[in-house]
Image: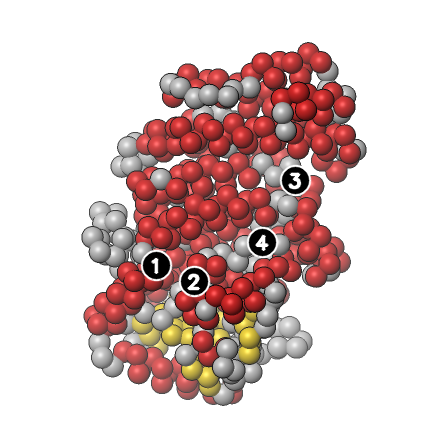
Amino acid sequence: MTNDANADALHAAGLSQADVARWQAAAQSTTADYAEDCHRYSAFWARSNDLLERLPAKPKRNAAETAAAHAILTAARDHRERFLAAHVDMVYDRLTNNRTRFLRVEQLVTDAAKLVPGLTPTQSQLAKEGDLRQHDKEGIETDQGIFLSHVLAGEQAGTHLCHAMLLPRPESIGLLAKLATDGSLDLGATSLQRQGKAIVVTAGNPRFLNAEDEQTLDVMEVSVDLATLDSHSDIAVLRGGKLDHPKYRGRHVFGSGINLTHLYRGKISYLWFLRRDLGFVHKMLRGVARPESVPDDTHGHGIEKPWIAAVDGFAIGGHCQTLLTVDYVLAADDAFLTLPARKEGIIPGFSNLRLPRFTGDRLARQLIQYERKLVCDSPEGRLICDEIASASRMDEAITRVVDGLTNAGAVSAVGNRRAFRIAQEPLDLFRRYAAAYARDQAYCVFSPALIANLERNWDAQNRKA
């Protein structure tokens, strides 16, 4: 939209000529010196926020006011893209003291808001939207996605951020001694139990068919840290916990993906997606990093071990995505897999990167774009599942698979999984995919299509949170 068209849209919404003129005067079309640009661009973002606050809250806007808000947000985001294209490396180096400090994505975006006002939303701005339903939110978290996309797109900054997200969480280090002593640990949403040469992670959220949400994410990452760092086991197993749902009571179920009810009600932040895929999911694939060693597989190694996924019942959405990172998938003969991204209106994590190497391009597109269901015990299902076992004998099958995969020693198993990874998904490929994913997922999560999809396909408005 041109500058004049923006002004017309803002005037049509009842914003004053003087306010619109001041906003237009603050607009920037070029970049130059970093310090000067910080001042100039922050001034424009401040003017943009002032205009937005003069409009009614999103649910109460008429068509003209909605168009004006869109024009303001779009112009502000265009400015962020321009500013970051010129200065993202400087911003990242300032935030991380020239890449000598590791900041996770959640801290990075918070600190960026303080360093360059308006670049990302402040904590108070996020808190203001925090209790709103998804369709009532302005979508200011999209600006976090724009920022993280630019960071990840840079080879040095992006690699450093990936490294930061692969480090063990501080609470994981604190719990490691207890796991070493007791051989088990109950963290609520997950539990860890050493069984022979294996450490078994059981993940559950029984009220929501073992779905993933804000309450499960950090606990899951801690569990992956602990399972990986546990020196008394050679292999890790991920299994879903037992449910109390009438249809599945007393049965293990691998999981139903993201908690769509929570997503619809605005209880899952945009950063959840980045924390998940750059956090525990990536750690299952690449291992836990060491601070002194870049985890790029060829020049620096982390700490890792093979993973087995034991799929009972179903692996839907994010739980199906997880299968693409593990070394062996054991599935019950009545289990199935789906990636219902089209019905949700979001990008299914890193599946678009990983799935084609399992299934080929055509089947991958059918799964992601046309919600094709795969029965595990089928020719197509076996492209992802390594072995099928009787649903009633999964415990015995897990023990047998663990024995079979560890009897040749842990060293060669780790070396072989690393060799596959170098060929299939080197860190630089992961980083470049993450850069695109960070921006595109942000726009998807706050798209009106997401709400329409969840209401049409999930009956989200009538489900209890």
Residue at mark 3 to residue at mark 1: CA–CA distance: 36 Å
Residue at mark 3 to residue at mark 4: CA–CA distance: 17 Å
Indicate the position of residue 77 as horizontal and vertical percent values: 55, 32
Q: Could you tell me which secondary element the residue under label 2 belongs to? A: helix
Residue at mark 2 to residue at mark 1: CA–CA distance: 8 Å
Q: Could you tell me which secondary element the residue under label 4 belongs to? A: loop
Q: Amino acid at mark 2?
A: Arg
| Image: 241 above or below 214 | below
Return the residue found at the far top: 18
Indicate the position of residue 459 as horizontal and vertical percent values: 73, 60
Q: Dividing the image into 4 quarters, which one contains the C terminus?
A: bottom right
Residue 190 visible? The answer is: no
Q: Identify the mark nearer the N-term, 4 or 1.
A: 4
Q: Which residue is pictured at 67% across the width and 42% down the height?
A: 132
Q: Amino acid at mark 3?
A: Lys
How many other residues sit within 10 Å of disc 1, few (<14), some (14-19) or many (≥20)? some
The residue labelled by disc 1 is: 425
Q: Which residue is pictured at 56% across the width and 83% down the height?
A: 334
Q: Could you tell me which secondary element the residue under label 1 belongs to? A: loop
Q: Which of the numbered marks, if any, corresponds to residue 137? A: 3
Q: Amino acid at mark 1?
A: Glu
Q: Which of the numbered marks, if any, corresponds to residue 346? A: 4
Contact, CB < 8 Å: mark 2 with mark 1? yes
Residue at mark 4 to residue at mark 1: CA–CA distance: 22 Å
Front tag of 3 and 1: 1
Of residues 435 and 199, which is closer to you in this image? 435
Q: Which of the numbered marks, if any, corresponds to residue 354? A: 2
Q: Identify the mark nearer the N-term, 3 or 1.
A: 3
Q: Identify the mark nearer the N-term, 2 or 4.
A: 4
Q: Identify the mark nearer the N-term, 3 or 4.
A: 3
Give the quarter of the image for residue 340. bottom right
